[in-house]
Amino acid sequence: MSDEELAALEETIRSYCGRNSLPSENELTELLDTTISTLEEEDTSYRPLADDGNAGGLLEFRENSLPLVIVPDLHARQDFLPSLLSCSFDGLPPLLSALNQNLVRVICVGDGVHTEIPQLVYERWWQSYEHWLDGNIDCPTMRQEMQECFATIMTVMALKNAFPAQFHFLKGNHENILNKNSGGDYAFRKYVQEGEMVRDFVRTVYSDVVLHLLSCYEGLLPIVAIFNKLGISHAEPGRAYSRQQIINYHSDDNVILDFTWTANDAAEEQSVVRQFSLLGGKPEKGDVLWIGGHRPVEGKYSLRQDGAYVQIHNPFEMNVAFVRPEKGFDPQTDIISIR
């Protein structure tokens, strides 16, 4: 991108996050159409095709020499990515410029929607829920929630379209706009009936075309990113799967389930080490690292599987993991606050 194009992209992203209104249907459909094409046409050198010819569930960067920024669950925190783009890591230029110069790769672990910080949004969800029960789906509190959700996922899509090989967003358990109980997904509720309320809002305020396109977009998101000695997924790998099973993730509901919904203490023993072995490596127990979000942590991180799995999602902080390929990862120093 030229400097002018990069500045225009930055302005577009800031406009998403600075507005106090919902995007128009045309704006949403155009952006979704573009992003769906981007995901469908990803380079097969790093995203191999499934047997049906569609984009597979695995991102493979075996020869990666780029530093990585790993972003935890966003949950409609519309200021997270814009703040991140202005940050510099380890002598690199600000992240937006570093992406443009192919100096860094960004992997987001998913969960773009549904605000979840109790002190900030509990009352808002309950007010929206009471309106929803009365049939008032498009109420002011729900509009505020959806403005933040759309600002966040539109930013994700804009970055994916601008830097398709450098910026990646994995599917989380909240990427389920239809609130379905199938295909490895479960209908979602935490404070109230968030999944059903969001689906009903989109169906009420927009056409079924937007709902359909959002579902298509979610269905094209990958679920695992693998590097030489690093793996990334939304949740802790529930069990280990072969490379072909992950690539053909839509052929087995359990594959999606086990990388997006795993509860603490629910994964099979040493699933991370076994997963690396099935993906072609023979790592030693202390020689691999898997990073994910999904389950909230206090502080910077939580370690599981004897330190092989690192959880980094603290919903009260804006922390990211910075991984240098040539250097070991220390969660105490390499999980960085961008506030």
Image (cartoon, rainbow, N blue to C red):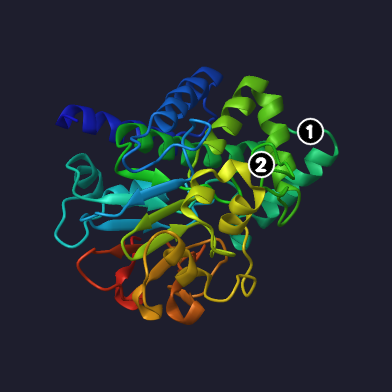
Q: How far from the left and from the top, in percent, is residue 123?
A: 69, 54
Q: Which mark is residue 141?
A: 2
The answer to whether residue 179 is visible is: yes
Q: How far from the left and from the top, in percent, is residue 31?
A: 45, 25
Residue displayed at 25% across by 54% down = 64
Location of residue 95 with respect to 21 vertically, above or below = below
Location of residue 147 with respect to 338 vertically, above or below = above
Q: Which mark is residue 136?
A: 1
Location of residue 127 with respect to 270 vertically, above or below = above
Query: What SS does tag 1 mark?
Result: loop
Q: Residue furthest top?
A: 26
Residue displayed at 32% across by 57% down = 69
- Between residue 235 and residue 146, name the one nearer to us: 235
Left or right of 224 on screen, residue 207:
right
Left or right of 223 on screen, residue 227:
left
User: Residue 210 appears in which quarter of the rendering?
Assistant: top right
The answer to whether residue 76 is visible is: no
Left or right of 302 on screen, residue 255:
right
User: Residue 249 appears in which quarter of the rendering?
Assistant: top right
Query: What SS does tag 2 mark?
Result: helix
Total number of numbered discs in the rendering: 2
